[in-house]
Amino acid sequence: MDYQWAMMGYSIHNQYWRNGYGVESVKAALPLFFSSLDFHRIELHICVDNEPSVRLAERAGFSFECKREAFSLENGKWMDFLIYYKNKEMNI
């Protein structure tokens, strides 16, 4: 069955930040999404204030698509999010 897209999320405990584990784990998961699960597109939705996650997305080969304003309600405040994506063809 061909699925269109999925959204990927990740969380790394702060004592392990800046060791490359986030990039390594995202890259390792891509074959699962694209080959095993047959998704065409993976998206990362990143809060505009989360610079480390933006760097992770870029280092993992994701491309910036757009900024979605007032996209998600977080702790009673509407937050802007950056959308990064990777298509199956980009991962070959």
Image: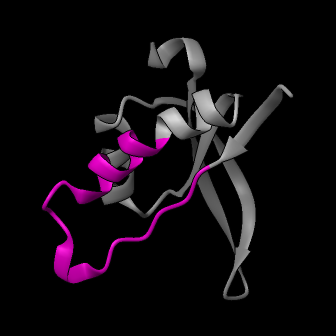
Residue 62, compared with residue 23, is above or below; it is: above
Quadrant placement of the C terminus: top left
Instruction: Report the residue at 46% width, 19% height from top.
Output: 91
Counting from the top left corner in percent of width and height, residue 22 is at 31, 56
Q: Is residue 9 left or right of residue 16?
A: right
In this view, the residue farthest toward the right is 1
Counting from the top left corner in percent of width and height, residue 33 is at 60, 38
In this view, the residue farthest toward the left is 19
Q: Is residue 66 visible?
A: no
Q: Is residue 16 magenta?
A: yes
Counting from the top left corner in percent of width and height, residue 25 is at 35, 52
Q: Is residue 89 left or right of residue 50?
A: right
Instruction: Report the residue at 19% width, 74% height from top.
Output: 16
Counting from the top left corner in percent of width and height, residue 56 is at 32, 48
Q: What are the residue bounds of the magenta stretch?
A: 8-29
Quadrant assignment, res 59: top left
Instruction: Report the residue at 59% width, 27% height from top.
Output: 35
Q: Is residue 54 visible?
A: yes
Residue 92, compared with residue 65, is above or below; it is: above
Quadrant assignment, res 61: top left
The residue nearer to you, when weighing 37 against 73, is 37
Q: Is residue 17 magenta?
A: yes
Instruction: Report the residue at 63% width, 58% height from top.
Output: 80
Residue 11, compared with residue 2, is above or below; it is: below
Quadrant assignment, res 84: top right
In this view, the residue farthest toward the bottom is 75
Quadrant placement of the N terminus: top right
